[in-house]
Amino acid sequence: MKYTALVTGGAGFIGSHLVELLVKKKLKVIVIDNLSNSNISNIKKLIEKKKIIFIKKNILDKKINLSKYKIDYVFHLAALGSIIPSIDDPVKYITNNFNGTLNILEKLKKQKIKKFVYAASSSCYGLAKYPTSEKNPIDNQSPYAFSKWSSEELVKHWSKVYKMPYISIRIFNAYGPRFKTKGAYGSVIGVFLKQKLEKKLLTVVGDGTQGRDYIHVVDVANAFYLSAKSKIKSEIFNLGFGEITSINKIVNLLMPTKIINIPYRPGEPYKSKANISKIRRLLGWKPTISFEKGFNDLIANINYWKTAPLWNKSSINRVTKNWFKYLK
Ligand code: UDP
């Protein structure tokens, strides 16, 4: 029997990798995406080959009609990303991410969903002790973090009242092909690759000793798939590689290059690292792509980065100013 999966945000960075995996696994796939912070080119071939159904709609849209499909699995990834713009426009972020999640849940209430897999964010831990387990206290530091975490609470609540099995995956720093670099708030890997290509100075925050837990998007997609298929339900999983990669290490992988040091963004964690023992134990998932391998693959496809816009000096200043404003 062919199962049907709904992927919100399926044209995005993680979503499009997940869609590819689901198609490979022979599921019927429906994508909802309004292309506001994603790219149709990520799934264009699959649409043209009629491998997936594409619905161009905002998750807030009351006119979304899913009643004609019998949906087995839902992967809810659609959301506005980026911490700093959310501080400038909290209403937009909370409305879109929370009410959007509510709308999708409401549209699916009458369906017998086998599993609702929610893409949560490690930002809910704030300035956490690491390695960070799922039991770590919640300490949202931005409207973005709050919107993602409160939507997770919504999913949990829905699951309890309407008997909908769920898994929530708190993703640490995902990276890989089709990595988002748009606008001033691209992730550091995209920012550095673009700067390197344009022979500009790499903007290293602080002394570069800080770091993040980078997990390759292929491993992320696999975790989502396993979450849907598993009998395990009503669980939250942290998802990372379980190792810290420092900013200086990324700089070294891009050598020869020159750097400029810029100020810390107040409120950002110094280091993050996921404790991934729970997802390993319950789902049998494990990361397969080391940072060196994943990063070198990205460099091998460096042409992609030529089209990405760059952080400029004024955006860096704006970022720092806004953080201070928020924390006052
Ligand atoms: N970072 C940096 N230069 C930049 C942008 C970011 O050195 O131009 C650092 C930042 O201090 C942080 C890390 O890169 O330690 C990851 O930042 P990013 O914005 O990619 O992710 P997040 O902080 O949201 O985890």
Image (spheres, helix red, strand yellow):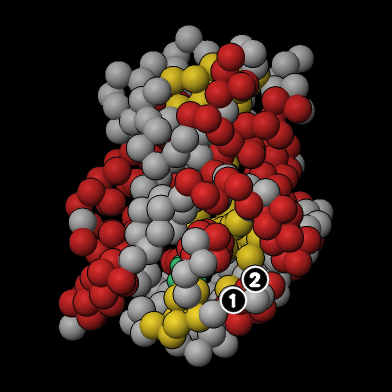
Residue 243 image-quadrant placement = bottom right
The amino acid sitting under disc 2 is Leu
Picture quarter with the C terminus = bottom left
Looking at this rendering, what residue extends furthest in the front direction? 199
The amino acid sitting under disc 1 is Thr
Q: Which mark is residue 79?
A: none
Q: Residue at 30% across / 19% down in the picture? A: 63
Q: Residue 278 at x, y = what percent?
A: 71, 64
* Total numbered badges shown on the rendered structure: 2
Q: Nearer the viewer, residue 171 or 282?
A: 171
Q: Residue at 69% across / 61% down in the picture? A: 295
Disc 1: which residue: 257
Q: Determine whether 307 is above or below 148 in the image.
A: above
For mark 1, give the secondary structure.
loop
Residue 13 image-quadrant placement = top right
Disc 2: which residue: 254
Q: Nearer the viewer, residue 282 or 31?
A: 31
Q: Determine whether 72 is above or below 296 in the image.
A: above
**With 236 as the anchor, is 25 left or right in this view?**
right
Residue 255 can be seen in this image: yes
Q: Residues within 10 Å of mark 1 (few under 14, many from 20)?
A: some
Residue 197 image-quadrant placement = bottom right
Is the C-beta separation of discs 1 and 2 under 8 Å?
yes
Q: Determine whether 127 is above or below 226 in the image.
A: below
Q: Determine whether 53 is above or below 221 in the image.
A: above
**With 14 as the anchor, is 184 left or right in this view?**
left
Q: Residues within 10 Å of mark 2 (few under 14, many from 20)?
A: some
Q: Residue 128 at x, y = what percent?
A: 50, 80
Real-space Cα distance between discs 1 and 2?
7 Å
Q: Residue 323 at x, y = what percent?
A: 26, 75
